[in-house]
């Protein structure tokens, strides 16, 4: 199955045949290994010091480098300088960066030019202006749509997905915002233009940064995701 970002000009037939799954906010080595064994497409690591899921010194680069090759490693940053993003990406072996602040399209272009794939996150409310995404379209591999709230991300709230029914751009996106195992059946049947995956975080936690593998497995089962017998 395809786990890397489709190109921006991809036709619907070129998009993944099943929803991609990103489990974000990984911080503890024990739960990292257990969740990786469940075969999500992406694992996300937050490098914003203001987040309760900040990697800091808790998780070593070796723990991230040791993940299976099939799992894409995503670093989450908020208004960080390009040089620092690149340094962290090199240290932890990241293939994607997810930008959750007020990063400009030019910074997205810089990061792509350096060989990273770029996910640009936006908080979505009822009056969200999709026209504002236009300058980002040439420079992002994915968008991520989360619930609009006081924090740059991780507000843990589900927003009204109907606002995405008229999504106009060719960049595929991930859906985030308080998703829990009980949402899996609904998410599995969503028919929204541009939707290719989901981002899971606080709804699967025992504590901030500590994912419950049983909840992750329940969500994947609800999506109908088959896993290797050894997982």
Image: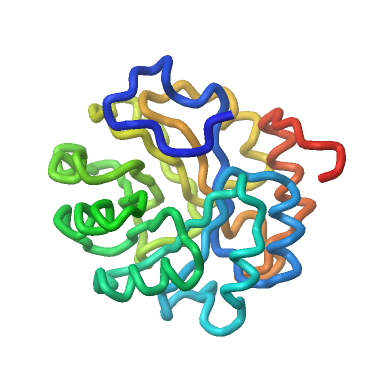
For residue 22, above or below residue 224: below
Residue 1: give x, y in percent of width and height: 59, 29
Residue furthest toward the bottom?
57
Note whether 49 is above or below 134 in the view shown.
below
The residue positioned 54% from the left and 36% from the top of the image is 20
**Observer-nearest of 172 and 145:** 172
Q: Position of residue 230 (x, y in %)?
A: 86, 43
At 69% from the left edge and 41% from the top edge, which residue is drawn? 219
Judge left or right: residue 177 versus residue 103: right
**5 to 49, vertically: above or below:** above
Q: Along the horizontal axis of the image, is 223 left or right of 162?
A: right
- The structure residue drawn at horizontal position 28% and vertical position 58%, both measured from the top left corner, is 114
Across and down, in percent, residue 54 comes to: 50, 75
Residue nearest the viewer, comparing 200 with 185: 200
Q: Quadrant of the C terminus?
A: top right
Question: From what the image shows, is residue 30 above or below residue 104?
Answer: below
Total marks shown come to 0
Q: Quadrant of residue 182?
A: top right
Question: Does residue 113 appear to the left or right of 196 in the view shown?
Answer: left
Give the colour scheme shown. Answer: rainbow
Q: Position of residue 175 (x, y in %)?
A: 45, 41
Is residue 129 at all visible to an observer of this figure? Answer: no
Q: Is residue 76 visible?
A: yes
Q: Quadrant of residue 192?
A: top left
Residue found at x 28% / y 45%: 140
| Viewer-closest of 222 and 172 | 172
């Amino acid at each position: 199955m395809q786990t890397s970002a489709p190109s921006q000009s991809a036709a619907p037939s070129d998009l993944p045949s099943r929803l991609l799954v990103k489990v974000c906010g990984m911080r503890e080595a024990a739960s990292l290994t257990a969740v990786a064994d469940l075969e999500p497409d992406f694992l996300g690591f937050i490098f914003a010091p203001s987040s309760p899921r900040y990697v800091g010194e808790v998780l070593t680069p070796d723990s991230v480098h040791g993940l299976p090759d099939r799992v894409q490693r995503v670093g989450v940053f908020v208004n960080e300088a390009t040089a620092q993003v690149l340094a962290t990406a090199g240290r932890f072996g990241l293939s994607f960066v997810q930008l959750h602040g007020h990063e400009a399209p030019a910074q997205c272009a810089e990061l792509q030019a350096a060989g990273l794939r770029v996910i640009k996150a936006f908080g979505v409310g009822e009056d969200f202006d999709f026209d504002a995404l236009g300058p980002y379209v040439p420079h992002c591999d994915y968008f991520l749509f989360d619930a609009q709230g006081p924090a740059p991300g991780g507000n843990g709230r589900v927003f009204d997905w109907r606002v995405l029914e008229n999504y106009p751009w060719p960049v595929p996106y991930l859906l985030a915002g308080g998703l829990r195992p009980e949402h899996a059946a609904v998410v599995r049947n969503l028919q929204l233009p541009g939707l290719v995956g989901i981002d899971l975080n606080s709804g699967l936690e025992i504590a901030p940064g500590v994912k419950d593998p049983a909840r992750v497995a329940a969500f994947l089962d609800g999506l109908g995701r088959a896993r290797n017998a050894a997982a």
